Image (tube, helix red, strand yellow):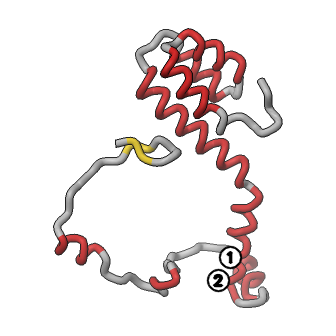
Amino acid sequence: LRHGSQGAVAEYQARTAREDVAARRPGRGRPRLGVVAREVTLLPRHWDWLSRQPGGASAALRRLVEDARRSTVTVESAREAREALYRVMSALAGDLPGFEEATRALFANDHASLDEVFATWPSDVAAYLTNLARGVRAPHDTT
């Protein structure tokens, strides 16, 4: 099955009610808040810095992670879109002529070459992949 905007392949597995209940056992931490306890290895100077932060080490780490996530959101979303396009492209057009060239163009951000290869493929496949490729292109990119 293809699932979501990322084109991920998912397998379907039927479960009985008992298996479902057993799988939902609460874990460590604060499961209602979605908090998961994990181990982090840091140098002593890092622990010293974290201990001086308002709210403690956990709050400081959460703030650092959120700041990093916000600063890389466009790069990460473009990477995810590129990987999703590659997965769909390999499933639909993996045997078509020009697939390797299209793959190289995709990962080189050569949108003009990618469009040239798409133009040689069946129109329905090309239209679908062209639509998906919009997520790979930067907002200011018109090539």
- Residue at 19% from the left image edge and 72% from the top image edge: 17
* Residue 58, disc: 2
- Residue at 66% from the left image edge and 34% from the top image edge: 134
For this view, does 43 lie left or right of residue 19?
right
Task: Decide: is 99 above or below 61.
Answer: above
Amino acid type, label 1: Leu
Amino acid type, label 2: Ser
Q: Secondary structure at mark 2?
A: helix
Q: Secondary structure at mark 1?
A: helix
Give the quarter of the figure containing the C terminus: top right
Give the quarter of the figure containing the N terminus: top left
Q: Please tell me which residue lies in front, 121 or 101.
A: 121
Q: Residues within 10 Å of mark 1 (few under 14, many from 20)?
A: few
For this view, does 126 lie left or right of residue 58?
left
Q: Quadrant of residue 102?
A: top right
The residue that label 1 is drawn on is: 61
Task: Decide: is 130 above or below 81.
Answer: above
Disc 1 to disc 2, C-alpha distance:
5 Å
Residue 141 picture location, percent across and down: 80, 32
- Residue at 72% from the left image edge and 80% from the top image edge: 60
* Residue 136, disc: none
Residue 139 picture location, percent across and down: 78, 39
Question: How many labels, in total?
Answer: 2
- Is label 1 in contact with label 2 (beta carbons under 8 Å)? yes
Q: Residues within 10 Å of mark 2 (few under 14, many from 20)?
A: few
